[in-house]
Amino acid sequence: MNAPATIAPKKQHLIDPEICIRCNTCEETCPVDAVTHDDNNYVVDPEKCNFCLDCISPCPTGSIDNWRIVARAYSLKEQFSWGELPFQEQIEIQTSVESGGDLEASDDDAARLIAEAHLGAGGKSVAPASAGKPKINLFNRGRPAAATVSGNFRLTDPDADNDVRHVILDFGGAAFPVLEGQSIGIIAPGADKDGKPHKIRLYSVASPREGEKSGANNLSLTVKREGDGVCSNYICDLKKGDQVQVTGPFGATFLMPDDPSANILMICTGTGSAPFRGFTERRRRNMKDAPGRMMLYFGARRPEELPYFGPLQKVPDGLLRKHFAYSRVPGEPKTYVQDRMRATPDEVAAFLKNAKTHVYLCGLKGMETGVDEAFADICRNAGLDWAALRAVMRAQGRYHVETY
Ligand code: A2P
């Protein structure tokens, strides 16, 4: 008798239109041009997607990480028309055998296939094992949270090149729970030149989970005015009492370990310092006796350009070991974070050798390669294999990158 010919159900990669903020990151990232969009939705072409998963970790909202097991793939036309994702349909796996018998797949088969698909998708970016369980996507464009501005302070010197702001948003009676490392979306009012609503922009939360001020239902952001950027100018110009439409929270992997014995090595440029302020405040306020160590490499043009420069000086070294790298101080060599790391190899190696260490990178995308090379060199001289170590740390949720 001939072996049965099985027509297997297919795994299909989909984007959740309710959560997607249309930032185009997935389309830019996809190496095989499988992601495309129309005026309504970003979608994945089932004919082109090869499940390489390159698009998964850069997606700021997690909307990209959706999978269905389908007997027939949803077409681009169908996906463009969606306002929400379809439910997982009950799959009938047609198994044709010579005798002509048809079998139905058990629910277990479908569940296993879905689980496998998801495991692959999430495999690149993993939350720390001890991180809190984040709430995500509580508010969206159709149903935003209303926040009131309770403060807007300039963080950089008046004569600095960059205008970076510390903006505090109060949620009044509405619950908007965030964990350190999560982001929120801001909707600038009005429409673009084509009459379409402005894109939602994401900003990392700079305060710890209990708020900018303990007991107040608020959070803070670190926002840099970007040339003619609509949303950043809108935020930087906000006045006390203004109302802001907020979406999110977003982000389920770039989270702080809750384990007090976890060591945290943070590397950032400019406003990439926002989540690390949240991490530091969490330890300072709620985990005073934490045995885990924290170390920060922070890059800016000059001290006057470095967000939170003043307050950072007051954070004791016992809580946070600080290394600053300045690139534009007159008369001094241009120094980047990776240069400071190379100048302090023993400190970096001591962190990396410890199995309780988590590494976080946040800020300019350009620093990724330089920092990676610095890690590789430091490891080589310390008898470590960075590529292997990074793979282990990533799989264990101990290596986290958020760059833009
Ligand atoms: P640079 O003086 O070369 O611009 P910004 O002020 O634009 O937000 O940048 C923050 C800091 O990040 C600046 O000191 C900037 O230096 C630095 N920077 C720029 N490119 C890189 C890179 N590839 N790696 C590390 N740091 C970088």
Image: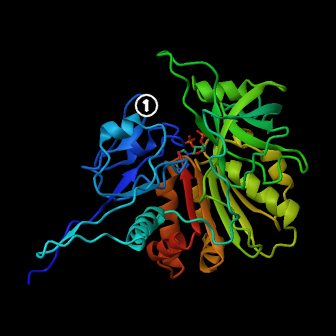
Q: Residue at x 42, y 52 (%)?
A: 55
Is the residue 144 above or below the residue 268 in the image? Answer: above
Instruction: Specify few, some or many for label 1: CA neighbours under 10 Å numbering under 14, 14-19, or 20 or more.
Output: few
- Residue 376 spot, x, y in % from top left: 48, 69
Image quadrant where residue 88 sits = bottom left
Is the residue 108 above or below the residue 179 in the image? Answer: below
Using the rendered image of the protein, determine whether residue 32 is visible from the camera's viewpoint.
Answer: yes
Q: Quadrant of the N terminus?
A: bottom left
Q: Residue at x 48, y 55 (%)?
A: 57
Q: Is residue 388 left or right of residue 187?
A: left
Residue at numbered disc 1: 40
Nearer to us in this view, 123 or 326:
123
- Residue 192 spot, x, y in % from top left: 52, 19
Image quadrant where residue 301 sits = top right
Amino acid at circle 1: Asn
Badge 1 element: loop
Using the rendered image of the protein, determine whether residue 329 is visible from the camera's viewpoint.
Answer: no
Nearer to us in this view, 183 or 279:
183
- Residue 110 spot, x, y in % from top left: 39, 67
Q: Residue at x 55, y 23 (%)?
A: 197
- Residue 146 spot, x, y in % from top left: 75, 32
Outermost left residue:
1
Ligand 1 found in image quarter: top right
Q: Residue at x 60, y 65 (%)?
A: 127
